[in-house]
Amino acid sequence: MEIFKQKVYEAVSFLQDRMPELPEIVLVLGTGLSGLGERIESPVILPYAEIPNFPRTTVASHAGNLIFGRLCGRPVAVLQGRFHYYEGYSTRDLTMPIRVLSLLGIKNIIISNSAGGLNPAFAAGTLMVLRDHLDFIPDNSLRGPNVDEWGPRFPDLSAPYDQRLIETTLACASRQQIDHVATGVYVAIPGPSMETPAETRYLRQCGADAVGMSTVPEVIVARHAGMRVLGVAVIANVNDPDNLKPIILEEIIDETKRAEERFLRLLLAVIPEI
């Protein structure tokens, strides 16, 4: 853990010297959603490969940049692409960027992803605001010695997603007349293989409305650090276990891209309200 701490603080020091101002919000952009990075005003773009000790993205649809700048007049930090357990990282290592940004003093984080729908009431393109989650990834990003100055040994997760941010997001969706916005429970699985029909049926029975391979480890670290969290999943497809069609990544990315405009409209309405 001492080695990991040293790596984290090296990255913090590097970024402190390069960010133009302290961001108020972190935005994590998931699969097919990196277009928001192009909306940043006066961007300072830092490829992950240039930041000391940052992991490296191996997924083609994740650009792999940290962007500082302004969005809707607010100073933001954008993680244009993320890391996953299935890439071979431990959850502690894949959440390192969240830890670093929290230590810079940022208090709010919006985490997005592309997910498979489990709730039969959903349709492809639904924007699901996360109200809770299930963690089926067999590793916890806080496993190992606790660093007390980073957060408590046993952080409370009775409200992992900030209720006021959820209510603000739903109100913004209503005012902007953005359709197909819902709330739901997200379940994180290890990946990279997609769900079988039996697994889809089981995840539904567990109470999940959408399934993906990310987000939860990041949320755990963010809450450990005292950050307020908003989660938004773009439902790329809906899985029917009794008539399960092949789940193709390229089709998921295409469907997410089709919903991206509505997703961006929602975020651009929410950010000024945080």
Image: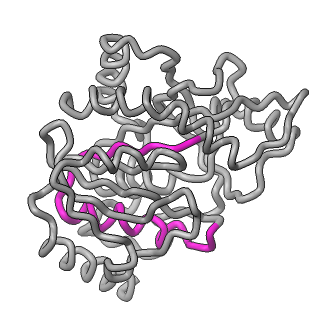
Q: Within the magenta stretch, is there residue 72?
A: no
Q: Residue placed at 59% from the left, 32% from the top?
A: 235
Q: Above or below — where is 42 with respect to 170?
A: below
Q: Residue placed at 82% from the left, 33% from the top?
A: 201
Q: How many marks?
A: 0
Please, which colouring scheme is shown? one colour
Identify the residue at the far right of this view: 242
Image quarter of residue 202: top right
Identify the residue at the far bottom of this view: 3
Residue 174 on image: x %, y %: 36, 11
* Horizontal side of residue 70 vs 55, given as left or right: left
Image quarter of residue 85: bottom right
Q: Above or below — where is 166 with respect to 103?
A: above
Residue 50 on image: x %, y %: 33, 79
Q: Above or below — where is 234 with respect to 97?
A: above
Q: Give the extent of the magenta segment.
A: 87-114
Residue 18 on image: x %, y %: 15, 71
Query: Depth check: 62 or 224 in front?
Result: 62
Considering the image in quadrants, where does the C terminus appear? top left
Considering the image in quadrants, where does the N terminus appear? bottom left
Image quarter of residue 267: top left
Query: Depth check: 211 or 173 in front?
Result: 173
Q: Residue placed at 43% from the left, 30% from the top?
A: 261
Q: Within the magenta stretch, is there residue 112?
A: yes
